[in-house]
Image (spheres, grey):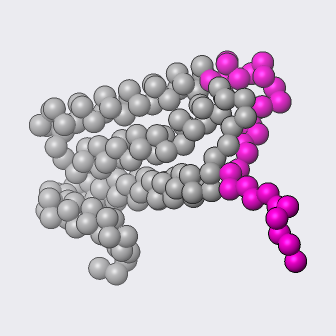
Amino acid sequence: MDHDNQTVSTDFIILGFSNIPNFRLPLFTIFLILHLVTLAGNLLILTVILLDPRLHTPMYFFLCSLSSVEIFYTLAIVPKMLMGFIVPRNSISFVGCVTQMYFFVTLGGSECFFLTAMAYDRYVAICNPLRYLIVMNRKTISWISVFRQLDLGLEDA
């Protein structure tokens, strides 16, 4: 059997708003402004927390980590989306799609983890205020961060 007359496509064609050209520029402008505001806000949070020594507490450490993850989270998705508003025929390769999905899922999971760690920090601060500094010390924060980096479950400890 001869397979000479076959076309193999390795790209996904992203349709989006390609059939409504009047919305492309306004949507590009709106999403670009929102993206820049998001990046500026997260960078401002990082800068303020890093520059003010009074904010070097567990809650602000987790907030700083959450802002860092949020920066990369938006950078994994939004630039390709913005390009889709400008380029008339937008496509993404299979490897590009898998890579983008990997970062999207990984950073989304990291964001959920940091929200959980922040909730635990607030739980300890509210329910055990006199023991807060003992429970949420540098060792505990490092332990939580290391387990997150290794993707191990906290319930095993």
Q: Is residue 119 visible?
A: no
Residue 138 or 150: which is nearer the viewer? 150
Question: What span is colored magenta in the figure?
Answer: 1-28
* Residue 16 lies in the magenta-colored region: yes
Residue 19 locus on image (x, y percent): 83, 30
Task: Report the residue at 16% width, 32% height from top.
Answer: 51
Give left or right: position of 82 versus 142: right
Q: Residue furthest bottom?
A: 156
> Is residue 52 shown above or below 57?
above
**Residue at left offset 26%, top offset 54%:** 125
- Judge whether 99 appears above or below 24 on screen: below
User: How far across and how far down the image is residue 30, in percent?
Assistant: 60, 22
**30 w.r.t. 62: above or below:** above
Front residue (pair 62, 8): 8
Where is 105 relative to 152, above or below? above
Q: Would you say residue 8 sits in the magenta stretch?
A: yes
Q: Position of residue 126 (x, y in %)?
A: 30, 54
Report the residue that reaches farthest toward the right. Answer: 1
User: With 96 as the anchor, is 141 left or right in this view?
Assistant: left
Q: How many marks?
A: 0
Who's the residue at 76% across and 39% down the image?
15
| Closer-to-camera residue (90/136) | 90
**Quarter holding residue 27:** top right
Q: Quadrant of the C terminus?
A: bottom left
Task: Determine if residue 104 is in view.
Answer: yes
Quadrant in which the N terminus appears: bottom right
In the figure, is residue 22 to the left or right of 98?
Answer: right
Closest to the observer, 123 or 16: 16
Residue 43 at what x, y percent from top left?
Answer: 32, 32
Residue at point 60%, 32% (across, down): 83
